Amino acid sequence: MIRAEKVFKSFSDTKVLKGIDFTFEKGKTNLIIGKSGAGKTVLLKVLVGLFKPTSGQVWYDDEDLCMMSKNELLTLRMKVGMLFQGNALFDSMTVEENIRFPMDMFTRMTAKEKLDQVNYCLERVSMEGINSKFPSEISGGMQKRVGIARAIVLNPKYLFADEPNSGLDPKTAITIDELLLDITKDNQITTIINTHDMNSVMEIGDNICLLHLGKLAWQGNKDEVLDSNNDTLHDFIFASPFLQKLKARALANGPVTN
Amino acid sequence: MNLLFHIGRFISWHGMIFKFPENWRMYYKETVRQMYEIGIGSLMIILVVSLFIGAVTAVQFTYQLQGTMIPSYYIGYIVRDMAIIELAVTFSSIILAGKVGSNIASEIGGMRQKEHIDAMEIMGVNTASYLVMPKIVAGLFVIPVLVSIAAVVSIGGGYFASTYSGAFSHEEFVQGLRSFFQPWNVCMMYIKAFTFAYILTSIAAYQGYFVKGGSIELGQASTRAVVYGIIVILMADYLLAVLLTS
Ligand SMILES: Nc1ncnc2c1ncn2[C@@H]1O[C@H](COP(=O)(O)OP(=O)(O)OP(=O)(O)O)[C@@H](O)[C@H]1O
Ligand SMILES: [Mg+2]
């Protein structure tokens, strides 16, 4: 469980986050949604500790992230995996070396154990057999998946993913969503995903936080999305004329019965 | 104000660099990779430059000595001491500040911009230490070796330039080489080599580590790494000259 409490974040004079209170729950896929520029990445980086909040607290269970000592922080880091919006794969290393890096650095596993774990993670993201490729030699979608593989290699308790399926075709996007959902449920971890993909919201939105103008505009789960009459949420979901038409038609036809 | 800010941050940043490594093997591997990169990568240019520096020294002093009462075997002595005391170490370091410095700054800066550093931080890596210490240590090992090679090669260059033109004989040059030798000068060369190695690697790494923005800023950081590296090397050269010869 991760809790943001009155989190404010400004960069010199731009206020990006203006008081976010939200609880990201364990064993659930928590989504942060919002328009481009809403501050999703900034919130994620505050939660993970890359940005210090201007004010407010971030709680990991009952420990305050900002108050942690060096050692506590290091212990926490071992339990955190993160996929960056731009993947952040190390481009001088192969896929295998990338995924192995956290194990090389922090574990005493044997070469065989590491290789098995690398292959297991690659299998989970359906990317077997690309061990010796360099990040520049694989497609963007494949890089995303390798990024996920690297994030889960040490079996994290907290998983952060910044737009895991942006730039992917709908089918691959759904595969990735399902993968993140599976990992979350299997290991009962706290997963936080940034997205502006409506399919993901409806597919895996256990606990949704809608950011708008630096504030929490709505919260709920995927089942509550359609029933809500929150304007910001509706603007966000029915953004395209096509969806607006669809909505209008649905309203005209009355509730769907089967 | 700005300068003070950077000096302050540069110094406090050292507290992050020299930490106990998370994993010795990874640091060792990285250090070896850097040694290879700095050493082998710069060997050619160091050879060429020092050969010519030695040759030019010889030619210039031949010109200066003409018509003076100074014995001609002095040429070997002058070439040797110029190389050891000043030219080999300072020239090499300035060249390395350009080549290695810009390389280090853009490598680390690129990692900062592509969020590689953030990704490592999230994993729990002390990035200041893992990305910087191996480069400094590699520089401290390899640059003095390059400087020694440069010294030998520039003396060789001086030898060829003075004997090839027929201005001096082999015997005269060698006699000069063997005269007035002071071990302290060699010692001074190594003190300078270590100091300059430290200066050029740490300044370059600093410029890269704190880079912001995009490719223009990265270019500027790598230019600053070279320019500041050279300026500080020359200031240190002056200070050391004063300290070590008094
Ligand atoms: N390091 C920074 N320095 C200054 N301003 C920043 C910084 N990072 C983000 N911002 C500002 O914060 C705001 C939110 O940015 P953020 O990257 O969080 O958006 P986002 O919701 O992730 O958008 P997207 O969906 O496009 O990724 C933007 O207006 C941006 O200009
Ligand atoms: Mg973003």
Image (cartoon, grey):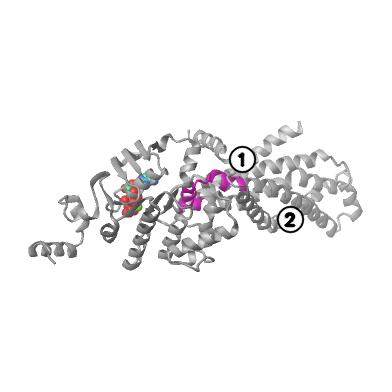
Q: Is residue A251 left or right of residue A237?
A: left
Q: Secondary structure at mark 2?
A: helix
**Residue type (three-letter) at the residue carrying disc 1:** Val
Q: Main secondary structure of the magenta part?
A: helix
Give percent across and percent down for residue B149: 76, 52
Q: Any magenta on residue B165?
A: no
Q: Residues within 10 Å of mark 1 (few under 14, many from 20)?
A: some
Q: Can you say which quadrant of the picture contains the C terminus of chain B?
A: top right
Residue located at (83% from left, 40% from top): B183
Disc 1 designates what residue? B232
Q: Secondary structure at mark 1?
A: helix
**Badge 2 vs badge 1, beta-carbon distance below 8 Å:** no
Give percent across and percent down for residue B3: 51, 36
Disc 2 designates what residue? B52
- In the image shown, does A39 or A254 lie closer to the viewer? A254
Residue located at (86% from left, 48% from top): B177
Q: Is residue B52 left or right of residue B19?
A: right
Task: Give the magenta range.
Answer: B109-134
